[in-house]
Image: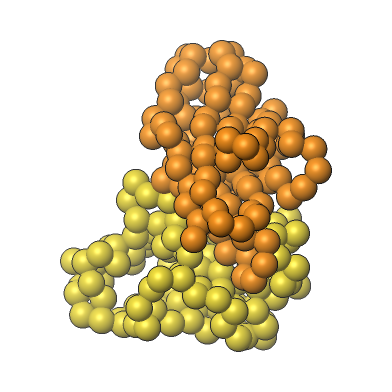
Amino acid sequence: AQSVTQLDSQVPVFEEAPVELRCNYSSSVSVYLFWYVQYPNQGLQLLLKYLSGSTLVKGINGFEAEFNKSQTSFHLRKPSVHISDTAEYFCAVSVRTGANNLFFGTGTRLTVIP
Amino acid sequence: ETGVTQSPTHLIKTRGQQVTLRCSSQSGHNTVSWYQQALGQGPQFIFQYYREEENGRGNFPPRFSGLQFPNYSSELNVNALELDDSALYLCASSRGLAGVQDTQYFGPGTRLTVL
């Protein structure tokens, strides 16, 4: 079985400051890793994904994430946040075989303070 | 490349009733997945359809059922509604069964409230 833990339910950060949103996963098989963002009253939008290769993945809107297999982590970072980054962020995993359904964490609410 | 739409936006039902939620995928997207997102939680996988056949199911009872049509539309049906069924229901489409090589594109969701 797969599970995803997002360690922080809420993260407040000042505008132009760096931010890290933490994600740890558990799985008995190899997985792919994702970060999605959900703006108010909208669906989920893919920020980035790790399938294979380089462990540092760059996504949209200046976000990046690093896959750490030994620590089973996939933390999301941005060096300088904007007001428009205020949203809910979800980490997710998918197993490498079978249906490509996603297992999501409970989300981290990022609030950027002016 | 988005364009996944869902209807209705909001819906209020009473316990015991039946509901049908609709999703329209992007042309060429043969796979549709449905997720339930309870308040304050991450989305949970309900089931997936590929070319009109169920291709996987999460831990949801049989009163949750689905259909996928050749015109890239799909439905989620829930019978005998319970209070705990109140949630945001999301559909997501992707091109095919290439697994996670295909990005899943999510619709805006349908907010279901069961009273």
Measured as percent of width and height from the top left, residue A82 is found at 58, 21
Measured as percent of width and height from the top left, residue B73 is found at 60, 77
In the picture, one chain is yellow; tell me its letter.
B
Looking at the rendering, which quadrant does residue B71 occupy? bottom right
Question: Which sits in the foreground, B57 or A2?
Answer: A2
Residue drawn at the location 63% of the way across and 24% of the way down: A78
A57 to A34, vertically: above or below: above
Measured as percent of width and height from the top left, residue B95 is found at 73, 68
State the colouring used for the structure image. Answer: by chain
Question: Would residue A56 appear left or right of B13 to someone viewing this image?
Answer: right
Residue drawn at the location 59% of the way across and 79% of the way down: B55
Question: Would residue A3 appear left or right of B60 to someone viewing this image?
Answer: right
Can residue B4 be seen at all in this image of the molecule? no
Image quadrant in which the C terminus of chain B is located: bottom left
Measured as percent of width and height from the top left, residue B98 is found at 75, 68
Question: Which sits in the foreground, A96 or A61?
Answer: A96
Residue drawn at the location 29% of the way across and 67% of the way down: B85
B97 to A110, vertically: above or below: below
Question: Would residue B41 appear left or right of B115 to someone viewing this image?
Answer: right
Can residue B76 be seen at all in this image of the molecule? yes
Looking at the rendering, which quadrant does residue B18 occupy? bottom left
Image quadrant in which the N terminus of chain B is located: bottom right
Residue drawn at the location 62% of the way across and 85% of the way down: B52
Chain A painted colour: orange
User: Going by the picture, which residue comes out furthest to the right?
Assistant: A53
How many numbered discs? 0
A40 to A79, vertically: above or below: below
